[in-house]
Image: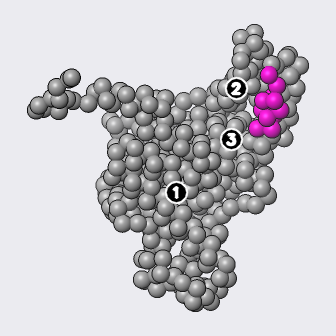
């Protein structure tokens, strides 16, 4: 989300200024809309898109029910969020690949340097994970070593590549679809075409010839997310000549303004289907307009975190979680957690998906990255097998040895031990919640929240409410008593 970082900060600052007001006036709305317009223009969003977006937001914000509501600022945020979702596409767009045709064909087009060849291999990897058997067709015969690059990427993701004679792009594409795919039992062909420096008539005609030869089910344009509103003229020309079906947004993890990403759908009417946020094969994801809009407004993407975790979950990780819950948290477990974090996209990506964290990091002036895990991993690797399994035995002498072996300081080793103790306490709290009743669960939740830095009194209050099923304190216990079955046998006679 770094590509939208500046825009996100500006929009959140605008909402912060509104939140200090009990009631909003028309002047307040006008000032806020001016700030939003400037923020979008500075992000290099197309000026026509900005004008239409702000006009729609302003019209809704000036409605009487918004201005007179108990919390008008929340209504303004809701309106901007809804309009931002519409700007990005409203609903998720899916590939339309008819089952009646085998193999299906997807053709990729775009400017040179947009990351098209890399996107082809990532798309193949993604669809392979969904049960498809893709073949990559190397139809970029103009860029030196383009076919070699695609072959290397294909080998990395376990997908075959057809490069033909390396001379005629149309022939290579036709052979891949009509002969090679069937020969290699592939049910999908992804055609990687040559990139253009700008709108080059000869190269554009080649793309049209490939399209006519293989009749692709879907044509996707790869767009660099760091491109500003200059991309508008490019995608408009491509759309007129190729009538592409959707967009793959590459380099979304970059640090440019990213206005082009917010302009494409409004200008072309074509949906963003996939986004790429890294270099690894698994960094291509289905695009969700609502989640992206929430992240731009600093609301995070908790659902995305859950999906990432579910993607990595397996029987072994579930067994490890159960062992940690029952036996405690070890240093080896900490190493395993770091590995999982990297698979989920790393610390920076996850931070952007947690509400408020991305902005807090920016305000602190200290960025986070996976490099910060390296010293911790070095210290853990300097421990003996027994020390990793039973960190409590690490005394002062052992800490000196670990510090020397990892090239770190004793203070850093002490901090690592403290972090482990906090994690172990949290696992102990969860263990108590799992093994005890509602009262024990309440105590466990309170302990866990206190370890996370929540005020003790507030932690106790929240835990009591949660353990009672979200009802006011005491109500849950009364309801449980009413529902409790009467004991069989002799009843004590009333006096």
- Residue appearing at x 62%, y 66% in the figure: 370
Magenta stretch contains residue 243: no
- Residue 243 in the image, given as x and y percentages of width and height: 59, 34
Within-10-Å neighbours for mark 3: few <14, some 14–19, many 20+:
many
The tag on residue 110 is none
* Mark 1 surroundings within 10 Å by alpha-carbon count, few (fewer than 14), some (14 through 19), many (20 or more): some
Q: Is residue 341 above or below residue 15?
A: below
Front residue (pair 424, 190): 424
Cβ atoms under marks 2 and 3 closer than 8 Å: no
Residue at the extreme front of the image, as rendered? 495
Instruction: Return the residue at label 2.
Output: 74
Picture quadrant of residue 317: bottom left
Name the N-terminal-most of marks 2 and 3. Answer: 2
Q: Which residues are magenta?
A: 12-22
Residue at figure coordinates x 72%, y 50% from the top left:
360
Q: Which residue is mark 1?
A: 344
Marks 2 and 1, how far apart at CA = 32 Å
Q: Nearer the viewer, residue 427 or 436?
A: 436
Identify the secondary structure beneath mark 2: helix
User: Comparing marks 2 and 1, which lies closer to the viewer?
Assistant: 2
Residue 21 belongs to magenta span = yes
Q: Which residue is mark 3?
A: 298
- Residue closest to the eye, 460 or 427: 460
The residue at the point 11 percent across, 31 percent down is 490
Marks 1 and 3 in Cβ contact (< 8 Å) = no
Relative image position of residue 451 (x, y in whole percent):
56, 56
Where residue 485 appears, as percent x and y from the top left, is 21, 30
Q: Picture coordinates of residue 18 (x, y %)?
A: 81, 28
The residues tagged by marks 2 and 3 sit, at their Cα atoms, a distance apart of 14 Å
- What kind of element bears circle 1? loop
């Amino acid at each position: 989300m770094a590509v939208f970082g500046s825009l996100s900060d500006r929009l959140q600052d605008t909402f912060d200024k509104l939140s200090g007001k009990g009631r909003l006036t028309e002047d307040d709305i006008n000032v806020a809309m001016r700030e939003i317009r400037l923020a979008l223009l500075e992000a290099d969003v197309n000026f026509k898109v900005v004008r239409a977006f702000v006009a729609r937001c302003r019209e809704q914000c000036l409605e009487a029910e918004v201005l007179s509501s108990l919390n008008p600022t929340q209504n303004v945020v809701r309106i901007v969020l809804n309009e931002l979702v519409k700007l990005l596409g409203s609903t998720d767009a899916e590939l339309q690949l008819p089952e009646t045709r085998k193999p299906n064909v997807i053709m990729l087009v775009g400017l040179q340097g947009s990351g098209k060849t890399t996107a082809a291999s990532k798309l193949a990897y993604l669809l392979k994970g969904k049960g498809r058997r893709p073949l990559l067709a190397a139809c970029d015969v103009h860029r030196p070593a383009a076919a070699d690059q695609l072959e290397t990427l294909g080998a990395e993701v376990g997908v075959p590549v057809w490069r033909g004679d390396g001379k005629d792009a149309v022939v290579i594409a036709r052979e891949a679809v009509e002969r090679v795919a069937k020969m290699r039992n592939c049910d999908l062909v992804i055609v990687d075409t040559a990139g253009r420096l700008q709108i080059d008539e000869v190269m554009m005609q080649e793309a049209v010839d490939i399209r006519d030869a293989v009749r692709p089910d879907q044509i996707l344009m790869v767009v660099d997310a760091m491109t500003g509103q200059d991309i508008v003229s490019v995608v408009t020309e491509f759309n007129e000549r190729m009538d592409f079906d959707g967009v793959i947004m590459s380099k979304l993890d970059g640090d440019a303004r990213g206005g082009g990403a917010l302009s494409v759908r409004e200008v072309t009417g074509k949906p963003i289907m996939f986004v790429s946020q890294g270099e690894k094969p698994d960094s291509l994801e289905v695009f969700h307009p609502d989640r992206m809009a929430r992240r731009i407004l600093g609301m995070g993407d908790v659902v995305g975190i859950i999906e990432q975790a579910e993607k990595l979950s397996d029987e072994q990780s579930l067994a490890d979680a159960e062992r940690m819950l029952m036996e405690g948290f070890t240093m080896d477990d900490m190493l395993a957690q770091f590995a999982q974090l990297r698979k989920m996209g790393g610390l920076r990506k996850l931070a952007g998906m947690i509400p408020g964290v991305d902005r807090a990091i920016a305000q602190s002036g200290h960025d986070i990255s996976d490099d910060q895990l390296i010293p911790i991993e070095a210290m853990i690797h300097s421990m003996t097998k027994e020390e990793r399994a039973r960190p409590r035995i690490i005394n002062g002498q052992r800490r000196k040895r670990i510090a020397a072996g990892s090239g770190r300081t004793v203070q850093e080793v002490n901090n690592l031990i403290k972090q482990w103790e906090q994690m172990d306490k949290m696992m102990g709290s969860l263990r108590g919640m799992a093994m005890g009743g509602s009262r024990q669960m309440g105590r466990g939740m309170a302990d866990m929240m206190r370890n996370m830095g929540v005020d003790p009194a507030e932690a106790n209050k929240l835990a009591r409410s949660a353990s009672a099923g979200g009802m006011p304190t005491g109500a849950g216990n009364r309801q449980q008593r009413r529902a409790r079955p009467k004991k069989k046998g002799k009843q004590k006679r009333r006096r």
